[in-house]
Amino acid sequence: MSLKGKTAVITGSNSGIGLGVAREMAKAGADVVINSFTDTDDDHALAAEIGKESGVTARYIQADMSKADQCRALIEKAGACDILINNAGIQHVAPIDQFPTEKWDAIIAINLSSAFHTTAAALPMMRKAGWGRVVNIASAHGLTASPYKSAYIAAKHGVVGLTKTTALETAEEPITANAICPGYVLTPLVEAQIPDTMKEYDMSREDVIKNVMLKRQPSKEFATVEQMGGTAVFLCSDAAAQITGTTISVDGGWTAL
Ligand code: NAD
């Protein structure tokens, strides 16, 4: 599968799943734009490293996905956007009656509204180019719920709805829109939680992973960022040209329960 000549913009991609997806897109030959709200030497060095390792053009563009104008500016600054991966996301855990309003607003803005703004800015470019792929990184929590994650779950269900609408509005064009629904993925953020959870439950690393973190993931294995990237690359392939408006679960069986 070659994505040579295509430009992929991946929101929230200086770590975790977004970075993994950016690397797989670049390996498949796409030029990539990586993004976060920061603007450090490390951010730009990361883009340079990805470009060098895959022989593609890789740029870092700073934009805060909690702000509508910066979401749209990201796409405009990219100059081209054949593949849009909406990945930026944050989490906050609290019961509904204690959930801080500013956390609710930030999660809805970053996890849901940003995908609306980037999609709105990218579709005219895709139409002009005569080809486009929108891949939204939703979650198993876009299809099912858990307590204490009201904003995240509302946002991720919203992302699935936005994906379906995007697909219907582009159905007669060579553009598709789909959502990937990951289960628990081993990102640096998740890895960092393991030592504290081991202490909290007085458990071994293996028990924490299997019996606490992966309690709802029947495979008892984390999904990987490479698998998310590989799934995104597949959704950009010719084989996936008629796959639109759907969700692909990469969750070790979570949503089959
Ligand atoms: P992460 O914290 O490693 O990555 C989040 C990325 O979003 C980072 O690059 C961060 O800089 C960026 N970001 C945060 N706020 C931003 C803002 N205001 N503007 C621009 N960028 C911003 O987390 P991750 O686990 O890689 O999560 C990536 C996506 O995958 C999220 O949408 C998350 O909900 C989803 N997801 C993750 C898991 C998991 O188990 N890790 C499971 C299901 C879904």
Image: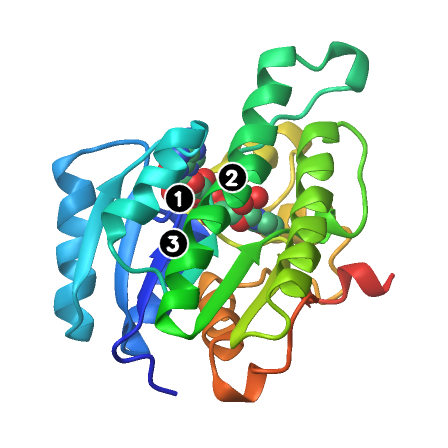
Query: Badge 2, how many Cα within 10 Å: few under 14, some, many 20+?
Result: many
Query: Badge 1, how many Cα within 10 Å: few under 14, some, many 20+?
Result: many
* Residue ID at (45%, 67%): 229
Q: Is mark 1 within 8 Å of ligand 1?
A: yes
Q: Is mark 2 within 8 Å of ligand 1?
A: yes
Residue located beneath label 1 in the image: 12
Q: Nearer the viewer, mark 3 or mark 2?
A: 3
* Residue ID at (67%, 46%): 213
The type of colouring in the image is rainbow
Estimate the spatial distance between the alpha carbons at disc 1 and disc 2, rounded to whole Å: 7 Å
Residue located beneath label 3 in the image: 10
Let me know if residue 194 appears in the view.
Answer: yes
Q: Is residue 109 left or right of residue 57?
A: right
Residue 97: x and y in percent read: 80, 12
Front in this rendered view, residue 217 or 56: 56
Query: Badge 3, how many Cα within 10 Å: few under 14, some, many 20+?
Result: many
